[in-house]
Amino acid sequence: MIGIGKIKPEKIRKEKTDWNQFLCGTPAKDYIFQNTPYEEQIKNAAELIREADFILIGAGAGASSAAGLMYSGKRFTDNFAEFIDKYGAANMRDMYSAGFYPFPTEEAKWGYWSKHSMINRILPPALPLYRQLYELVKDKDYFVITTNVDHQFYKAGFASDRIFATQGDYGLIQCEKGCHQKTYDAQEMFRQMDTERKDCLVPSYLVPKCPVCGGNMAMNLRCDGYFVEDESWHSAAESYGEFLQNMKGKKGVLLELGVGFNTPVIIRFPFEKMARGNKDLSLIRLNLNEAVVPAGLNERAVGINCDMAEAVSDLCDITRSEEGKSL
Ligand SMILES: [Zn+2]
């Protein structure tokens, strides 16, 4: 907003600006779907990864749904049948919207969230897509920034001091009003709730209370103004900052996975901005439907519009076979 006071009002009205331009500086018309054949794109992406000194992974919701943690369809109706019956299909459309349902009691709220955490955070093992991603970058200097809260990067072997999960964790709870900046591991509590839940409700004695103010607790998810950024959140944020500082003068790849337009200001737009401002950086964008890339990045951008599980698996295969050749 600096200097906006100097712009004459008529100038502002004439500017054809939209939200895309405002947030990321690239006008929507400058985005392109690359028409390079898929095989060639994978080859180009593998080459960029091979030549890179470091890889910065940015992962959004699309990565986990491609990995198998789908929030809608059969996976939802199979696991949440009881909740759909009780609260109605119109209110329980998928695991995303169900989380926003105004549960009438704490027993009902934790009845739902304990199930959600079991299904998406506690029970799933490290999924193949995440394990392959780890294989792809483990010998590089890497860092992960993710809006996902399902802990998959940790499970797949990525070093915990190289992950910044900005939006919380399904395994943690906090004071609902954020009265103190601390989170609590709730996995054991959720397991117990899962065995004792009846008619979608947990027994009252299992309902957690804030140890400081005595009020209600909530999931540690950034969904309102009370999100708690605890000590480890701050230390991860700091590590991310340091990683960005240290990448200056080195060749790197920004590997963006399944980041749409829900919260593009955390990964998608900053990655584009970094790539535009630094010729040593390339952007590999994997996205099922939205793999458009800024045209100006030319061969420094690869936008692969396809099933990510397949693309990551192909990237792993080609990288492995190239390694074999160089031995
Ligand atoms: Zn409190």
Image (cartoon, helix red, strand yellow):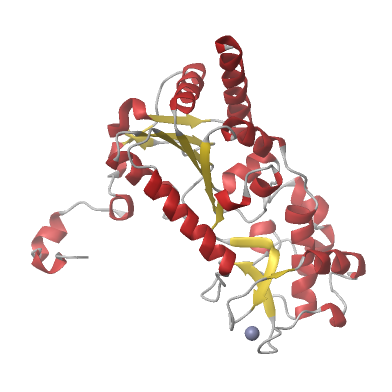
Residue 186: x and y, percent? 76, 68
Residue 114: x and y, percent? 78, 65
Residue 91 in view in this figure: no
Which residue occupies the foreground of this view, 35 or 214? 214
| 35 versus 135 height, above or below | above
| 239 versus 88 height, above or below | above
| 83 versus 17 height, above or below | below
Which residue occupies the foreground of this view, 311 or 37? 311
Residue drawn 62% across the image and 20% down it: 317
Q: Quadrant of residue 14?
A: bottom left
Residue drawn 73% across the image and 80% down it: 104
In the orientation shown, which residue stands out farthest toward the bottom? 213
Quarter the N terminus occupies: bottom left
Counting the numbered discs, the total is 0
Residue 179: x and y, percent? 58, 84
Residue 316 in view in this figure: yes
Residue 235: x and y, percent? 53, 62
**52 with respect to 140 (left or right):** left
Residue drawn 44% across the image and 25% down it: 51
Q: Quadrant of residue 147?
A: bottom right
Quarter the C terminus occupies: top right
* Ligand 1 in which quarter: bottom right
**269 with respect to 218 (left or right):** left
Residue drawn 68% across the image and 42% down it: 157
